[in-house]
Amino acid sequence: MNPDRVGIDPLGGQGSQLLALDIEGEELNRLRSRYMDIADQEWNEVVRTAAYLLGKCPRVNSLNTVTTGLAIGKVQSGKTLSYSALSALAFDNGYGVVLVLAGTKTPLLEQTFSRLTVDLVGGSPNVTPFKNPTVTDSDVLESILHNQRHALIVMLKGSSRISQVKEIFKQPSLNGKPVIIIDDEGDEASLNTQFRKGKQSAVYRSIMSLRSVFRSHSYIAYTATPEANLLLGGIDGLSPDFGALIYPGSSYCGGSVFFGERMDEFVRPVPPQDGVAESGIITGSMAKAIAIFLVGAAIRHKRGESDWHSMLIHNSSLKIEHSQAYDAVKLLISSWKTKIGYIDSDPEKLALLSLFKSAYDDLSLTVVNIPNWDNLKDDLAREIWQVEVWIVNSLPSGRDPMTTSMRLPNNIFVGGNMLGRGLTIKGLAVTYITRRAKKETNADTLEQRARWFGYKEKYLDTCRIYLTEELKSNYAELLRHEDDFWEALSRNMRQGIPIRDWPRMFVLDPEMGINPTRQSVASYRLFRVTGWKTQRRPVEDPTIAENNLKYIREFFVKHRAQPKVYGKSEGGTEHTVIENCPTDAVISELFKNVKTDGSDWDNSYFKEYLTRLYLAGLLPSLNVLLMRNGRTEGRKKEEGGEINPFVGSSKDNYPGDQYIHDNLPQFQVHIIGLRDREGDPISVTTSSFALYLPKNDPRFNLDFVVRGQENENNSNI
């Protein structure tokens, strides 16, 4: 089983959503006929996910219903097919309009429009495509909808284009029926980059303005890097209230293939000093990578594969350095063309063949039944003469592989930003990447550069990734990060917890200099739980506080808590304790039922943190104490409304609440009688929590990045 696939129902156990939808309609069946190469099981999963998403959208006869969704896939795993299926399903179930925001660049728009036209329009008399429509298209669109046909609108994600579409749908005859807005690469450009200034960026403002036109609609962002979307503030207009995971097909090769247990098979080191010199001299690791690329081409062509064979060189964000790399690679290929034609005894040809033989030996580690070297080396001249080198950037000499057809079987692409998000390089087998920010970088940006992910199972054995040691460590960390939040989201979906209630927790090592996303679009902070973490702002609402106390007392009775003296046997302090209380009981009973206001102790985060420790087998149990047997402790509110729940030492008899843990995990529950700053009682009895995890125990040394809060000065987080 492919480790990039998680064997659970993508609907999170909510398959009943399917019952209200027609999943055997004309448009979906027509789409299926175009993808007969996809196995039934995988196709059914595509449909189930699309049906789940559509089930969260307004019904066609609904009024004033607005929902916001997030569809999370993996890099180059087939998200377009997912929203093609969603669109077809929407048309079959009465939607007249599906509107697709297709990226910020014209080549990506063209690629998406072409793909969706093939998927949804070709052969269908019922679906009419519009690309970047303007107000002049209103009459045609109105006629299409009047005749019960469907409109597929695909447009650039730019404020002027979005405003044009808004003007179309401002007309009363067009804005009365539900619409689905699909935002491809929904973490890019759409989000508000001005939120810290209290303003709205242009594209974000135009999307929100467009949404305001429709009486009922659903906006669904598709992305493989959802960090920014998930870390948006809860009141942000694009913060999702439902979501789905889009599982890749069985032949997908992603992070778990390249940076999991088999990493040493596919990843090769780039020494720190290596790269392309300004003089046009290519260093050893680059030459070896190009040699492996050409030997891999010979192997693939020898076994009858006629697909494109490609290499990616991503060395810089600077166009001048792209040009230097491009010139150096072209010069190298030209010299190899000459040398491969020398007589067999020529020293330069022998040196070149020695380099190719080294590449052959490397590939023999993964290629099963590799052709004999003596038979293969004669093919290398042909492969060298069938190489085209591309420079991919906005320079006049740059070209875009999305819109420019390949002309030779072997292609080497050199560039920067344009080789990132949204670009699929056909037949990509070898990647040489050294680009990384010097100090800090973002997880979503790094992952989008992993263009070598994708459906490569057929030629995976010829794939190699050349990285610096720092980047290798970064991508291994990104695999841990991605696996972690996919597992957490999957678990929450299975339990029926909507994505809006999922505590945003991303595991990232702060020492590696990887942030989850750019700080211009989302606020986040570090969440650490070692040593004591205390609830210093207890609930003051009398009704909630009373219910909390009821659940707390029931919990200690249910688990047969026993009194125990801490400190000296005579003169110590007695607490009620559940020793070795199962952690899952604390999670599913106390944290589930007791409500906190989240100002300094958010139960959802502590619940998720303990859940991860519990599921990993790191914290099967902990000691749970009802302090002073549940007697009320008077506490005066300090400036800012905080209290200190701990009682200090009592002469030599009792060391104090925070020193009775014996360096073992401990959870304390304090019953608090609040007093105002003058010490007068407030008519509320409430509770306060305190959690201790040993500081120097590596099992609990987990750091998470979580969504920012209005109170950024919380000392407990």
Image (tube, rainbow, N blue to C red):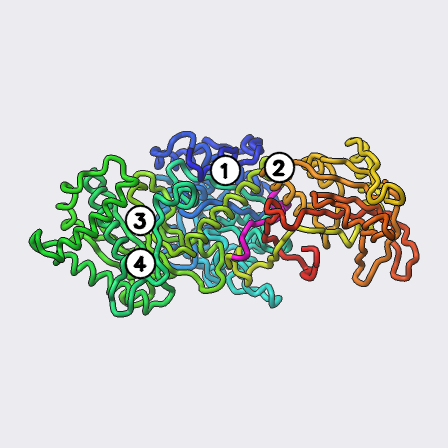
Looking at the rendering, the stretch of residues picked out in magenta corresponds to: 498-511
Which residue is disc 3 drawn over?
A: 428
Mark 3 Cα-neighbour bin, 10 Å: few <14, some 14–19, many ≥20? many
What amino acid type is highlighted by mark number 4? Asp
State the SS at label 2.
loop
Give how far across and how far down residue 604 sits, in percent: 67, 45
Name the residue furthest left. Answer: 343
Residue at image location 48% in from the left, 50% down from the top? 477
Q: Please indicate whether residue 47 sits to the left or right of residue 237 in the image.
A: left
Which residue is disc 2 drawn over?
A: 496
Earlier-in-chain disc, 4 versus 3 = 4
Front position in the image: 69 or 391? 391
Residue 432, picture quadrant: bottom left
Earlier-in-chain disc, 3 versus 2 = 3
Residue 400, numbered label: 4
State the SS at label 3.
strand
Front position in the image: 531 or 101? 531
Q: Please indicate whether residue 238 sits to the left or right of residue 155 in the image.
A: right
Q: Please indicate whether residue 408 sits to the left or right of residue 392 in the image.
A: left
Q: Quadrant of the N terminus?
A: top left
What amino acid type is highlighted by mark number 3? Leu
Whether residue 495 is situated above or below residue 116 in the rendered picture? above
Earlier-in-chain disc, 1 versus 3 = 1
Q: Nearer the viewer, mark 1 or mark 3?
A: 3
Give how far across and how far down residue 346 sits, in percent: 9, 56
Front position in the image: 262 or 66? 262
Mark 1 to mark 3 CA distance (whole Å): 28 Å
Residue 49, numbered label: 1
Task: Tell me if label 1 and label 3 are in contact, CB under 8 Å.
Answer: no
